Image: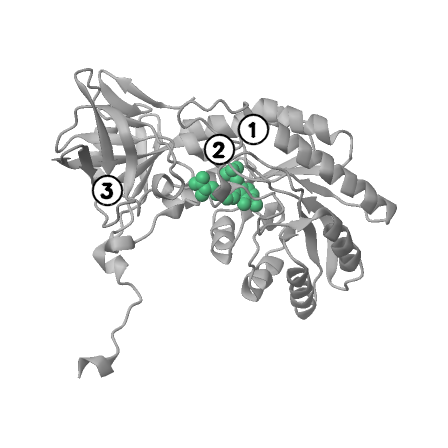
Amino acid sequence: MHDFEYRQGKLHCGEVPLEAIAREVGTPFYCYSLPTLHRHIQAFEEPLSGVDHQTCFAMKANSSLAILTYMARHGLGADVVSGGELYRALKSGVPGEKIVYSGVGKTTGEIEMAIAAGIMMFNIESEQELEVINECAGTLEKKAPISIRVNPDVDPMTHPYISTGMRENKFGIDVEASLAQYLKARDMENIEIVGIDCHIGSQLTDLSPFIDAVQRLKMLINRLKEHGIELKYLDLGGGLGITYSDEEPPHPRDYVRAVLDAVGPLGLKVIFEPGRVIVGNAGILVTSVLYRKQTGTKTFIVVDAGMSDLIRPSLYGAYHDIRPLEDKPEAREKVDVVGPICESGDFLAKNRDLPMLGRGDMIAVMSAGAYGFTMASNYNSRPKPPEVLVDGTRYYVVLKRQSYEDLVLGETVPKAILK
Ligand code: LLP
């Protein structure tokens, strides 16, 4: 369900014609719907009412300060994976105790920053990381709260690049080794064991891998109890998929209920780290057609957004629906929609059946609210696009387009090479 609809033949976000935003900020630009965001938060939170839980939005999906601030105001916490994300979370008003810190490569600087912020817990990914966190906490004369990210070895049946909970992935610690790490952590002076964590992958459209993971974690929780280790938190990660084309992922309500059912009466606070399901279909990327180009066998629609703005099609072969801003019922054709970047992999859609598009026409690349802007780069020295947030009849430019000066910020040319 979203708020990007045609009205009198023009694609709108809420009450605002996207064309009007394009006139003000130019193209390409990201556009997010605040009411959709709100609905998605509600859809996730509603089945959790009365349940001891904390939803920690996975900021890697979208780290806009405006969006995070809105989430913080609605009680959400954050799942962070870098000092930069932690900085953004705190700046957006997310309290430290609602922040979980994931990721395989936390630096000592980042660890110290997180301890100082009083986060809920570090999700530990390796033995060495546990040791380093213990040391850092010692230096700061604090105790660091930790959970171990268990790799439950279940197949999430998703794209291999975004599957994380199988034995061969770099993430987490396998079940047997986790027990050993918990026992080790128990004896560490500056570590407080508070939870257990897993995240098995992203864009899952089936519930069974989530349930399998919960079962495996429960077995470990029981074994920990036998060793006298009691936990406070059960962190189930994120991963629920969305509809990009014809996928039929479970509704968040069904996901939450099924997972809670599998968890049963454990007496632990349940932590969720959803990303995509909250923001994915709340955002789009709007781009203009620069040229039509016909080769012997193909028609290319060259647009002003490319893999530097939205890398998902290039990196994962991901499908994003494409809609012209102006509804064109006439003739259709099969085209590749490609960007201006000097790479053959720079495309937004391949062999897509679209209405005839010409120079100056604008299109919306749908479902781009998650892992869109956050994965944007300056490749080919292209300024990053602006971000616009729409709320009914009003819209706000929450990030302005980068300028050429922004692109060279911080660069210096050593005098020596001017000789
Ligand atoms: N928690 C952890 C520890 C994660 O690694 C992730 C995503 C999430 C939560 C949120 O997962 P979600 O609910 O969004 O599925 N760039 C890829 C997705 C990478 C996901 C990485 N981890 C894409 O564009 O599809």
Q: Earlier in the sequence, mark 1 or mark 2?
A: 1
Callout 1 touching callout 3 (CB < 8 Å): no
- The residue singled out by tag 1 in the image is 44
Q: Earlier in the sequence, mark 3 or mark 2?
A: 2
Q: Is residue 351 above or below residue 94?
A: above
Q: Secondary structure at mark 2?
A: helix
In the figure, is residue 149 to the left or right of 356? right
What is the distance, in whole Å, between disc 1 and disc 2 at their CAs?
8 Å
Q: Secondary structure at mark 1?
A: helix
| Residue 395 locus on image (x, y percent) | 31, 33
- The residue singled out by tag 3 in the image is 339
| Residue 147 locus on image (x, y percent) | 69, 50
The amino acid type of the residue labelled 1 equals Phe
Disc 3 Cβ-to-ligand 1 distance below 8 Å = no
Callout 1 touching callout 2 (CB < 8 Å): yes
Closer to viewer: mark 1 or mark 3? 3
Q: Is residue 104 above or below residue 363?
A: below
Res 126 seen here:
yes
Q: Is residue 285 above or below residue 419?
A: above
- The residue singled out by tag 2 in the image is 278
Colouring method of the image: one colour
